[in-house]
Image (tube, rainbow, N blue to C red):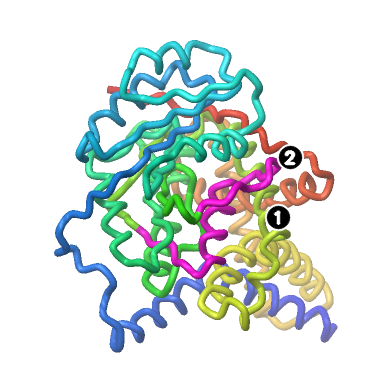
Amino acid sequence: MTVITVLFWCSLFLVCYSYVGYGILLYIVIKLRRLFVSPRYTGNEPPFTPEVTLMVAAYNEEAFIREKITNTLSLNYPEDKVQIIFVTDGSSDDTNNIIRSYPRITLLYEPERRGKTMAVNRAMKFVKTPFVVFSDANTLLNKDVLICLMRHFRDEQTGAVAGEKKILVAEQAEAEGAGEGMYWKYESLLKKWDAELYSVMGAAGELFAIRSSLYEDIPADTILDDFMISFGINKKGYRVAYAPDAYAQETPSASLEDEYKRKVRIGAGGFQSMSRLMDLLNIFRYPKITWQYVSHRVFRWTVAPLCLLLALLTNIVLCVSGAPLIYWAILLMQAAFYGMALVGYVLARKQVKSKVFYIPFYFVFMNVAVYQGFGRFLRKKQSAVWDRSQRQLTTG
C-alpha cells in the first residue's frame, strides 16, 4: 500500500501544481523579480508604427467575412503602412467574390484545400513588411490593436507578441460560454505573468504578431501552427511578449459537440507539438524557458489528465483498504466535484446556464478531450486541414 499511497499524493500534488500551484509560484517569482528588474514596458513610450502586414486565413467564411473586412479596414493605423492579405485556399462559397470587392485587400487563393499551415506558408512569401499580424477570420479586433502590438517590438529581443482572446458571453448565453470564458480569463492571467517573467508560452492563433524575418515554413501536417510558430521564435533566442490591450473577440462554440471537437483537435496538436519540441525539455540548452514550458504546457497536456485519473483510482483503493479518515474526506470531495461536473453536463445539454456546475464540467470536459486527442495523435488520425468551428451568433 505504500506504493499506492505515494502514487495518490504525487498525483494530487501534480494536479494541484499544474492548475493552481504553478500560477502561485509564478506570481511569487515575478514579485521578487520586480524588486530588482524594472518593467520592460511602462505605457508612456511614443507610438511605434512600422510597416506591417495583417494576414487572415479564411475558409468558407461568407457569412462573416464582410464584418471581418469592415473591422480590418477600420483599424487605427496609418493606411499607407498596412498591407492586408486574405488567403482563402480551398474556399468554395462566396468568400472570394466578397473579398475581391475590396481593392485594399490582396486575395491569395488556390482551389486545392491543403490546410491552414500550407496556406500561411505560401502567403508569407508575399509579405513585404518587417512585421506580420495573424488574425482568425471569425474574430473582431479592437481599433488600436496594431498600435498595441507593434509597441512591444521596440525591444529587439521581442520576436513575437501574443494578443488577448476574449469570449463574448451575453447574459442569456448558453452554458458553454461561461466555461470557455472563465478558462480564457485564467489563461490570460497566466500569460501576463509568463510574459513578465520571460515569455508567453505559445501564442493563440486568434491574434499574434511576429518579426517577418524570424518566420520559417512549418511542416504541412502541423496541427497547431500558432503554437509551433511562436515556440520556433523562442528557440531562436527571442521572447514572446503579451499585449492584453490588443484583443480578438469571438463568440463561444455553438454547441458542446463543436467545442469538444475543437478541444480534441487541440489535444492531438499538443502531443504532436511536444513531440517536435523535445529539445525544450533541456534546461541547460533553454534555461530561460524550460520551467515555464514544462509547467504551463507539458504538465497540462500530459501529467495533469493522467494524475486526475490516478488520484481518483488510488483514493478509492486506499479507502477500501481501510486508510485513515483523511482519505475518505478527500474521496468525498472528489466525488462531490465529479458529481457537480455530471450535473453541469446534464444542464448544459438542456441549454441551462449554471456557472456553479458548468465550471467543474468544463474542467473535466477539457481533460477527457486530451485523452481522445492523445489517441488521435498515436493513430495519426487528426488532420492538419482544419474544420471551421460553428460559433454562437451575436445579437445586436
Q: Is residue 30 left or right of residue 45?
A: right
The N terminus - image quarter:
bottom right
Residue 253 picture location, percent across and down: 50, 33
Visible in this render: residue 195?
A: yes
What residue would you read off at disc 2? 382
Tag of residue 244: none
Q: Name the image quarter holding residue 244.
A: bottom left
Question: Is 356 or 189 nearer to us in this picture?
Answer: 189
At numbered mark 1, what does the secondary structure look like: helix, strand or loop?
helix
Residue 221: percent from left, percent from top: 71, 42
In the rendered image, residue 50, in percent from the top left (x then y), is placed at: 27, 49
| Amino acid identity at mark 2 | Gln
Which stretch is magenta? 215-242
Q: Residue at x 55, y 44 (%)?
A: 344
10 Å crowding of disc 1: few (<14), some (14-19), many (20+) = many
Residue 80 location, x and y as percent?
Answer: 23, 35
Q: In this view, does 210 lie to the left or right of 334?
A: left
Q: Does the magenta stretch include residue 224?
A: yes
Q: Dot 2 surroundings within 10 Å: few (below 14), some, or many (20 or more)?
A: many
Q: Is residue 113 above or below residue 18?
A: above
Residue 271: which disc? 1
Above or below 220: residue 16? below
Seen from the viewer's position, the closer of residues 131 and 377 is: 131
Looking at the rendered structure, the kind of residue marked 1 is: Phe
Does dot 2 land on a helix, a strand or a loop? loop
Q: Is residue 226 left or right of residue 338?
A: left
Mark positioned earlier in the residue sequence (1 or 2): 1
Indicate whether residue 157 is drawn in magenta: no
Residue at x 31%, y 24% (from the top left corner):
104
Q: Which residue is at a point 68% across and 38% down the rendered structure image?
A: 384
The C terminus sits in image quarter: top left
